[in-house]
Image: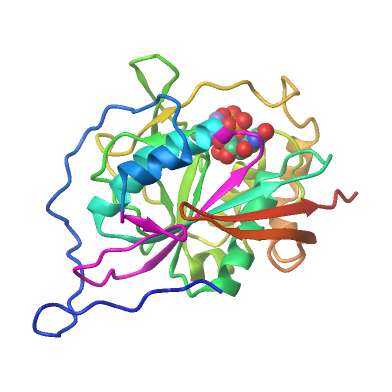
Amino acid sequence: SLNLREATHDKNGTLKFCSLSPTDLVGNLACKCNETTPEEILRDNAGLIKEGRVQPLDCIAMEKVAIVIPYRDRYKHLHQLLSMLIPILSRQKVDATIFVVEQVGPVLFNRGALHNVGFLEAEKLGKFDCYIFHDVDLVPLNDQQVYSCGDNPIHFSVAIKYGLSQHFRIMYKANFGGVVGLTRDQYLALNGNSNLYFGWGGEDDDLAARLNFHNMTKLRRSLSITRYAMLGHQRQNIVNGNPARNNILKTAKQRMKIDGLNTIEYVLHNLNIHPLYVWFNVTLLMKE
Ligand code: UD2
Ligand code: MN
């Protein structure tokens, strides 16, 4: 299990919670979107991250955050993201552990199912209050949006700049993809994500539907701080995405209780605790 360091004390030996508005934030950031390596990230962020965990040392964070990254074959993106994210988390004084959930094997990619695996496996390693599901290719461009959860599920990645474009496109109103944050309890109440969406698309709308059916309203913080850069990439193999996605979505409501955290089937092949992340290798079964 993870070595979750104990809460720190100040000079007088008393416990002190971290401020909700940290003082060393800088606001808008330029994307350091150049290629980098794990070694370089560790060197640039010496002492800031250990066993995938960024933790304030001069105060106690209010919550323990798990950042879950669904992943396959995006090594370059992962490290571009982490080279931006780690210093941001550190300035924000959040206590966050980064989990990479890599889908291995021949089966089509299933982002929603990987979110569920990340949640269930993180639960075995520590106690987390807040889960932030994070696309590997979305790099935060403003550190004033703190990586924390709240009374409502949070949509973090609202204004997105694609590739070299300077223009931020606002995500459509119902969108709940990209980067989202839910408390442990909120995610449990939804029974997590659907496991049925193999291939591109639909799983984010299914999660949005689960929120609606639970009368949860999502929170979007202000446009000036919900900015992300999407790193350039090829779409997943099928141009129009998973052809079954709209049909599956029709039954979102009926499936909530019988398709999710309580029904996922997967095999965990490997758990690797690296300085930068906790890395899971999993295979999913594709079922009718
Ligand atoms: C959109 C959504 C995304 C998801 C997807 C449909 C936003 C900003 N993005 O992203 O959240 O709903 O549509 O499934 O709303 N991935 C891999 N390897 C792969 C394929 C996917 O690691 O081969 C992971 C990775 O974390 C990636 C994410 O899945 O960022 C979403 O896939 P995408 O980036 O190919 O899809 P995109 O940009 O259309
Ligand atoms: Mn993407």
Region rendered in magenta: 47-75
Is 7 situated above or below 163? below
Q: Nearer the viewer, residue 273 or 90?
A: 273
Which of the four quarters of the rendered structure image does ligand 2 lie in?
Answer: top right
Q: Is residue 118 visible?
A: yes
The x and y percentages for residue 13 are 14, 85
Q: Nearer the viewer, residue 275 or 207?
A: 275
Which residue appears at 45% of the width and 26% of the height? 35
Q: Which of the image's four quarters has the N terminus? A: bottom right
Q: Quadrant of residue 5?
A: bottom left
The x and y percentages for residue 80 are 44, 33
Q: Residue furthest left?
A: 12
Which residue appears at 68% of the width and 65% of the height? 261
Which residue appears at 71% of the width and 66% of the height? 257
Which residue appears at 65% of the width and 34% of the height? 73
Q: Quadrant of residue 258?
A: bottom right
Q: Residue furthest right?
A: 288
How many numbered dots are placed on residues in this image?
0
The x and y percentages for residue 140 are 36, 37
Q: Nearer the viewer, residue 250 or 180?
A: 180
Q: Residue furthest top?
A: 165
Is 40 situated above or below 167? below
Is 135 situated above or below 61? above
Left or right: 60 in relation to 34: left
Q: Is residue 55 magenta?
A: yes
Q: Is residue 155 magenta?
A: no
Q: Residue furthest bottom?
A: 13
Q: Is residue 193 visible?
A: no
The x and y percentages for residue 243 are 79, 30
Q: Nearer the viewer, residue 20 or 193?
A: 20
Which colour style is shown? rainbow
